[in-house]
């Protein structure tokens, strides 16, 4: 006897029961939530301090909410308060030429990023596609630069910049990392090596030379890793502190990271102007946070695609 089967009536909706989440999945979400909380907590605390008054911070330093909420810290950071008003609110009164320092940071970061990406891409193309004697040996020596700590290069770079007469200038800040870095060359070389050679051969049949292939074929194809590397380079140069501190001595070449340290050193009798300092720090960090958030998905996909062969 055949077993009787029942079919749902026409038009009836079939409800699918969702599988219960496993213990491992729940723990993964808990760990991710904890990591997210630990990552975002410092930014919230910066915002809380920036919106508090200096007197309120001293009176209740552990409050999770802004104490005696005010926008005076942002006004001092942007230079919108007079010296008398700044001193009255616990500021140093020395002022912070925020827009000049911001412009200096933009100029230095843009110069480093544009030149480093361009020259690193050409070097990566030479290591990946051009055949010349000793190519692999030179590349191995070039990669050895990744193992040299940055602190070891500061003094030779300083002597070189001083001999070139570029001390206390924006070009002097940008020059040591303006041409190329081992990581940038390695990163782009891996992408160029993954491009099929048939694409290059087809361009050669169409009459394109090596320079034309690089600019018209490979470089447009590498737009995603190039943008990824540009974002990472821009953020790194924006956050650099020690090298600009060594070579900049006046407002004409002082970048924002160095200016924030000087702003903190302008301590009034009442103590450090934490409200103004945190406000300036938050304003300085917002462009990089927005830049990284906008390109985050492209950065992840580019890193996973470029990979190590």
Image (cartoon, grey):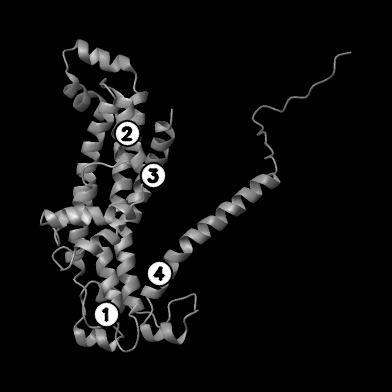
Which label belongs to residue 46? 4
Q: Residues within 10 Å of mark 4 (few under 14, many from 20)?
A: some
Question: How far apart, in angstroms, are the residues tagged by discs 3 and 1?
Answer: 38 Å
Q: Secondary structure at mark 4?
A: helix
Q: Secondary structure at mark 3?
A: helix
Q: Residue 276 placed where, x, y %?
A: 31, 76
Q: Secondary structure at mark 1?
A: loop
Q: List the residue tagged with mark 1.
A: 266
Q: Is residue 240 left or right of residue 60?
A: left
Q: List the residue tagged with mark 2.
A: 188
Q: List the residue tagged with mark 3.
A: 147
- Which quadrant would residue 218 be assigned to in this image? top left
Which label belongs to residue 113? none
Q: Residue 161 placed where, x, y %?
A: 16, 55
Question: How far apart, in angstroms, are the residues tagged by discs 1 and 2?
Answer: 44 Å
Question: How far apart, in angstroms, are the residues tagged by discs 4 and 3?
Answer: 35 Å
Residue in the image at 42% along x and 64% along y: 43
| C-beta proximity under 8 Å, tags 2 and 3 | no
Judging depth in this view, the residue of 183 and 152 nearest the camera is: 152
| C-beta proximity under 8 Å, tags 3 and 1 | no
Count of marks, rendered view = 4
Question: How far apart, in angstroms, are the residues tagged by discs 2 and 4?
Answer: 36 Å
Mark 2 vs mark 4: give the one in front. 2
């Amino acid at each position: 006897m055949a077993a009787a089967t029942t079919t749902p009536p026409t038009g009836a909706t079939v409800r699918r029961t969702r599988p219960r989440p496993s213990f491992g999945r729940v723990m993964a979400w808990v760990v991710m939530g904890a990591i997210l909380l630990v990552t975002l907590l410092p930014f919230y605390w910066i915002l809380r301090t920036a919106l508090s008054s200096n007197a309120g911070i001293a009176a209740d330093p552990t409050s999770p909410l802004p104490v005696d909420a005010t926008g005076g810290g942002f006004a001092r950071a942007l230079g919108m308060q007079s010296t008398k008003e700044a001193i009255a609110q616990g500021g140093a009164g020395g002022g912070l030429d925020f827009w000049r320092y911001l412009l200096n940071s933009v100029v230095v970061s843009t110069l480093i990023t544009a030149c480093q990406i361009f020259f690193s891409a050409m070097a990566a193309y030479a290591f990946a596609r051009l055949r010349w004697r000793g190519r692999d040996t030179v590349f191995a020596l070039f990669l050895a630069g990744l193992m040299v700590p940055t602190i070891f290069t500061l003094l030779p770079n300083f002597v070189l910049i001083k001999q070139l007469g570029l001390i206390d200038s924006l070009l002097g800040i940008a020059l040591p990392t303006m041409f190329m870095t081992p990581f940038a060359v390695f990163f782009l070389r891996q992408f160029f090596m993954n491009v099929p050679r048939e694409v290059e051969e087809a361009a050669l049949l169409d009459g394109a030379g090596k320079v034309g292939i690089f600019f018209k074929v490979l470089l447009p194809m590498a737009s995603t890793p190039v943008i990824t590397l540009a974002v990472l380079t821009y953020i790194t140069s924006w956050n650099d502190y020690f090298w600009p501190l060594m070579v900049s001595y006046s407002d004409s070449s002082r970048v924002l990271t160095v200016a924030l340290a000087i702003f903190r050193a302008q301590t009034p009798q009442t103590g450090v102007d934490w409200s103004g300092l945190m406000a300036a720090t938050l304003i300085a960090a917002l462009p990089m946070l927005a830049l990284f958030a906008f390109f985050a998905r492209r950065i992840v996909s580019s890193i996973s695609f470029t990979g190590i062969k």
